Image: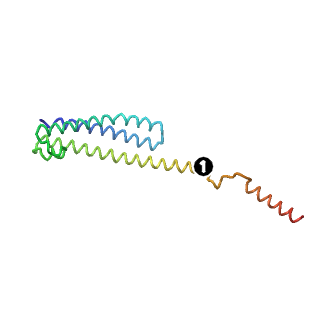
Amino acid sequence: MSIQPIIQTLDKLVNVHKTLIQISEQKTEVLKEGSADKLQSVLIEEQKFIPKVERAEKAREEAVVNWFADKELNDEEQTITRILDLLANGVEKKQLEEVATTLTKAIAQLKQREQLNQALIQQSMQFINVSLNMLQPSMSQINYGRSKQNETSRTREHSVFDSKA
């Protein structure tokens, strides 16, 4: 069995991850703008790609399992790295190395972008909390009775009245 089905599935995964990177970059810009409506539409677009990633990953797993079964290496660790170790130097090995490296880089880039987005979201939440705290009066500011100004003027009236009596 040729290594090409594995390379093709890895190419699909690379393409899906590149699209997710673009969406993640859009999300970063929307987070910077602070537009909740735009953020919701970007998140909906992002959610559409989750099944695509899952399907591509499942296809990759099946291609790897089939390759090992074809080579009758069922007791081996069934990973791309192990396939690279088993392949003789050649065109297919080089292609597999390149696409695996490209996928690894795409995943790392997406992870880094999502960490940035997470930090932006946390920063936005902190800003919202600070803003809400500033808008809500504290317990010491709530006054259920007379104002302090009224109390002090009445105290003076009492003391003046008490001294005359």
Q: Locate residue 49, reporting x and y percent.
A: 33, 35
Figure quadrant of the N terminus: top left
**Is residue 3 depicted above or below 138 in this figure?**
above
Q: Locate residue 154, reporting x and y percent.
A: 80, 58
Nearer to the camera, 148 or 92: 148
What is the three-letter code of the residue carrying label 1?
Gln
Nearer to the camera, 141 or 114: 141
Q: How many marks?
A: 1
Judged left or right of residue 15, residue 93 is: left
Judged left or right of residue 157, residue 77 is: left
Classed neighbour count for the residue bearing mark 1: other residues with Cα under 10 Å, few (<14), some (14–19), many (≥20)? few
Residue drawn at (61%, 53%) of the image: 138
Q: Which residue is mark 1?
A: 136
Q: Secondary structure at mark 1?
A: loop
Which color scheme does this rendered protein use?
rainbow
Residue drawn at (56%, 48%) of the image: 132
Residue drawn at (86%, 64%) of the image: 162
Figure quadrant of the C terminus: bottom right
Nearer to the camera, 70 or 109: 70
Residue drawn at (76%, 57%) of the image: 151
Q: Locate residue 64, reporting x and y percent.
A: 18, 39
Q: Locate residue 120, reporting x and y percent.
A: 43, 47
Residue sitting at the far right: 165
